[in-house]
Amino acid sequence: MRADLETAFEEFVVSRQARLFRVAFLLTDDRQHAEDLLQSTLERTYQHWRRVAAAETPDAYVHRIMVNLANDWWRSRRHAVVETLETGVAMRSAGDCGTGQVDQRDLLIRALRRLPAGMRAVLVLRYFEDMSEGETAVVMGCSVGNVKSQASRGLQKLREAVDGGPDVIGLPKRSAS
Amino acid sequence: MSSDFEREVGAALHATADRLDPPPLHLDRIRRSGQRRRARSVSAVAFAMVIVAAGITAGGVNLFARAGTAQVPATPGLGRSRPPSATRPAGAGPSELAPAMANVRAFYGSYGIAQKQGRGAVEALIRTRVASWYRPILEAPSGISLDPVGCDLPGGARKLRYQPVGLAGGQAVVLVGSRLPGAAQTAYAVVTAEPITGKITGITCAIAGAGNDVTSTGARNATTSLYRTYVPARRRGTSVKDELTQLLAGGSSLASPYLHQAQYAVSQQLVSYDPLLCATTVIPNVSVGPVTIVASGSAGLVVVTPSNGQSILAVIVLGAKGWTVADVACRRP
């Protein structure tokens, strides 16, 4: 690869590394998986760097790589992951209930982790990366309508999880409407 | 509606993730792995292309369904007797065509969806996938009923077939084809793209099997005729806008969507280069080179070489009004 492209890649990695790692963490379920996902994403990015660098929105391109890899990873580990997460949630909930100190955000994050990979990715891109519906659609490779419905259903599931959970001080409950 | 809850979700995500420090990254490891991946993918593409080339050589197989009677193989250098092709065959450099193939696939794979979403989505797609210098021309009114971007290819994205043709006139050429329902004809978009970035630099719509077969002689003559009129007029001081208007006043040029679009873009000052010579200041001499027939005989690629160096690729079709220069693909002017 040309020297200027190498330099551009290095600058890109340095400037985006932290942010991408956080997205990776939210797309997976733990730090180790997030590190693997980030590594794989950057390898793929490097593989196609000439094209990524030429794109008008390199960030969207890289996010797309990451979301696709995360989806592949979830697909290949679906059963094992569900088991791990359920066990983890159950154990943590039991401990939390014992002290009566369940944090509302913790509850939301646990509910998020139980969402399907695509729905979770939409929520992460929309509400963590602050992407518009159009930008999210480009990253996800689907229509804006699909993004809207995924986000709506994802939020609904989070609400249901929150509403159905233990009483939490300060948790915004959904109105009866 | 649910903005409080959305904000709460955002805050929860930030509270969870923002405190994380990224792991130490080893750029060299990333580079090495990326290089290995690239080498593997290039080998895989090369292998696939060798298989395809072998199939074509052995049996005259066309990747597209055969259309009509006067079939011309889409792969240059085979079949009908004609002058040597200027197009490097796909098998010679698959990696050189990979960005174009990927970009064209991505473009036509999303175009139908974008159309359903509205003008904004189409514009966003064009912004992403089309070369900046060609964009104002592509988005201009074309003077034809056919959609000059999607070419009204039937059957939706899943029915489209993509075929790399080769490199010609500094452009990577990719065919996008789809069989017309209930007919032995195939509709094509002949797409040219910038080889390095894969960005689209030209789209020509053509229908094969409709008795409109392009011949090398016809394509070359049409191109020569256009430039023989255009270059001297420009040398005499006629502006690009006036000369394009003059060309569109009659004859077969009237049917050229590209000339309509270029004339509009120039008159609206949306482009600052000469869309037939791909030049910004000088008016070069041009020589018209060899022709490659593609898209089952429905389009001809003619390499035009200006005296100042950068090649141009003209795409010729045979329409109801005769031979038409349907597109002129430029590198970055």
Image (cartoon, coloured by chain):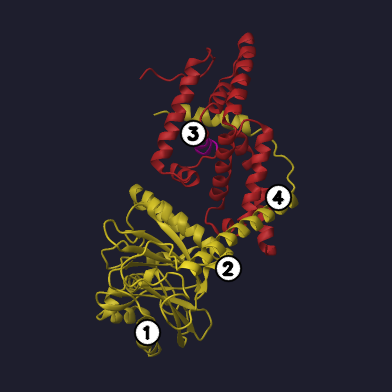
Mark 3 vs mark 4: same chain? no
Residue span colored magenta: A121-128
- In the figure, is residue B262 to the left or right of A154? left
Which chain is red in the rendering? A
- In the figure, is residue B152 to the left or right of B2? left
Callout 1: chain: B
| CA separation in Å, label 3 and label 4 | 29 Å
Q: Earlier in the sequence, mark 4 or mark 2?
A: 4
Q: Is residue B52 magenta?
A: no
Pointer 3 residue: A119
For label 4, count other residues whose C-alpha is less than 10 Å away and answer few (under 14), some (14-19) or many (20+).
Answer: many
Q: Earlier in the sequence, mark 1 or mark 4?
A: 4
Q: Say which mark, if any, is on residue B93.
A: 2
For label 2, count other residues whose C-alpha is less than 10 Å away and answer few (under 14), some (14-19) or many (20+).
Answer: some
Q: Tell me the residue at 47%/30% (across/down).
A: B6
Callout 2: chain: B
Pointer 4 residue: B30
Callout 4: chain: B
Q: Position of residue B277 (x, y in %)?
A: 44, 80
The answer to which quarter of the image holds residue B245 is bottom left
Residue type, label 1: Thr
| CA separation in Å, label 4 and label 2 | 26 Å
Callout 3: chain: A
For label 1, count other residues whose C-alpha is less than 10 Å away and answer few (under 14), some (14-19) or many (20+).
Answer: some
Give the structural element (helix, strand or loop) at label 1.
Answer: helix
Pointer 1 residue: B217
Farthest residue toward the top? A98
Q: Is residue A163 above or below residue B262?
A: above
